[in-house]
Image: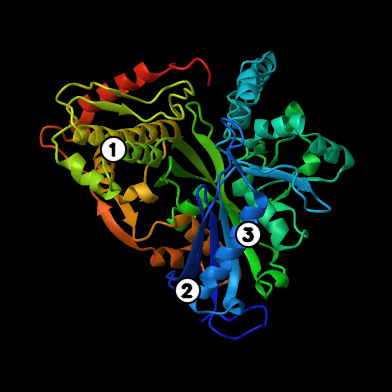
Amino acid sequence: MGTQRNGFCKLETFILSVDVGTTSIRCHVYDKSANIRGSCSSKVSLLYPQPGWVEIAPDELWKGFVTVVKGAVQDSGLQMCQMEGLGISTQRATFMTWDRNTGKPFHNFITWQDMRAAELVSSWNGSCTMKTVHGVMKMLHYLTRQKRFLAASLVVFTTQHVSLRLVWALNNIPQLRQAVEDGSCYFGTIDTWLLYKLTKGLVHATDYSNASATGIFDSYQMCWSGFLCSLLSIPLSILPMAQNTSHKFGSCDPSIFGVPIPIMSVMADQQAAMFGECCFDTGDVKITMGTGTFMDINTGNKPHTSIAGLYPLVGWKIGAEVVYLAEGNAAGTGSAIKWAQDLELFSDVKETGAMASSVEDSDGVYFVPSFSGLQAPLNDPKACASFMGLKPSTTKRHLVRAILESIAFRNKQLFDVMLRETRIPITKIRADGGVCTNDFIMQLTADLLGHKIARPSHFDMSCLGAAFVAGLGTGYWKNQEELKKLLNTDLHFLPRRSKAEGDKGGQYRGVLQSWERALQRSMHWYNQP
């Protein structure tokens, strides 16, 4: 049994882990077998002060964080002094700035969904400056063959990255500009703010996984990008120090939870889910199907340079070892199902699999799930969501089947890009997120990918990943091999092959091609991004 490091009590110890997601904050208490001994959750309230703006009130987030930690420990029937370490996983690229001396925020958190920088993104991507940067970087790549120059020659800004949303804030919030001039400004993503609050202002830090998702971090050099920050006039002085994912960031001030719990890991949510799924080896793939879909492949000790829009991320840095991921994402996964429910195509999400299976096919109906444009490999923010092929014989069941099929089809698209670009042999695929409870989507995805897909027994993989990293840091768990033995699998989905067509997903080729035609028809629909 582990014993507490801080000398407050000698009872059996546990690991605390909190995941701050887009819609909720969840805390679990884990034991040595990675079983959940106590849990608590609260909702994240999103604010929409103007069309396209999406914010979170920092004080509400902080209160929610403290509440779920206390609630989970209370639910477990354990004492706070039995918590050996704390791991924190957070949504990525949601940021805030605040006064380093008083801790007073200059504005609410500006979330990754926020579109206020859309015009800036459009003007920067089409600017002469960017054309010049791309040209110079292509030349440098030609001369040196260094992949980081090829990566820089392909850089495009998006609203999901921190970069231009931070530029917007610097340009539009006078007290923030003044604080930058005075040297009293701190910038941080959610993890940085939580570290600052938990340590009563002693720590201004992030980890490499969170930093790499901001769009202003150089994953090749493992530091903030001086070049991009200079280009965008973002002062390096306001940025937090990037630390290892497994690192003693400090201890929670005793006034918060009664004892100084060591903060042993902070981690970005998708990378944490990858770690929670034990995707430690090159070629391991994780598919998270929540509000959107995130597909990640472990690319080993080298960042991947993408041409089709996969994003190179730092997965984690533990000791001297850095593990990189390549990520593709598709918006409109869980959100498409929720939209269909709001339209009353069905009353309970659990019905959807049976509804889809009750018809032989979608009767030639195709759904394009692009409520937020299309991401890799098509990368078209102006695409519209649509149903195509509707006819008098179309029923609700056909519509539901078309929606579920579209999620699996997007998985196939992302997977093909990943294979084509990384050329890394796939070693295993694991799925998580709320949508992976849908057997129809899981089976169709396995058929299309031609690979076995494992579904875990519980889906809070971001929480588990942050707990695993924290526990490795305190010695609660010895190594990654021990963690693999703790992983539970609910079900394996094996690809079904038709006798006529033995190749991967061959029986769906015609349907897939028709769906891709529907995608093309939906592209470039809106004039504005």
Residue at image position (39%, 63%) is 487
Sequence-wise first label, 2 or 3: 2
Residue 63 higher or lower than 30, as above or below: above
Q: Which residue is mark 2?
A: 31
Label 2 and label 3: CA atoms lie apart by: 25 Å
Counting residues from the N terminus, which is met first, the one under dot 2 or under dot 1? 2
The residue sitting at the left extreme is 499
- Residue nearest the observer in this picture, 340 or 518: 340
Up the image or down, 339 lies above or below 259; here it is above
The percent position of residue 2, horizontal first and vertical second, equals: 54, 79
Residue picked out by circle 1: 404
Which residue type carries mark 1? Answer: Leu
> Distance between the Cα atoms at labels 2 and 1?
36 Å
Tell me which label, 3 or 1, sits earlier in the chain: 3
Quarter residue 426 falls in: top left
Identified by mark 3, the residue type is Lys
Q: For mark 2, does the 10 Å Cα neighbourhood hold few (<14), some (14 to 19), or many (20 or more) residues?
A: many
Residue at the image point whose x is 58% and y is 35% from the top: 114
Quarter holding residue 400: top left
Q: Residue at x 27, y 26 (%)?
A: 366
Residue that badge 3 annotates: 63
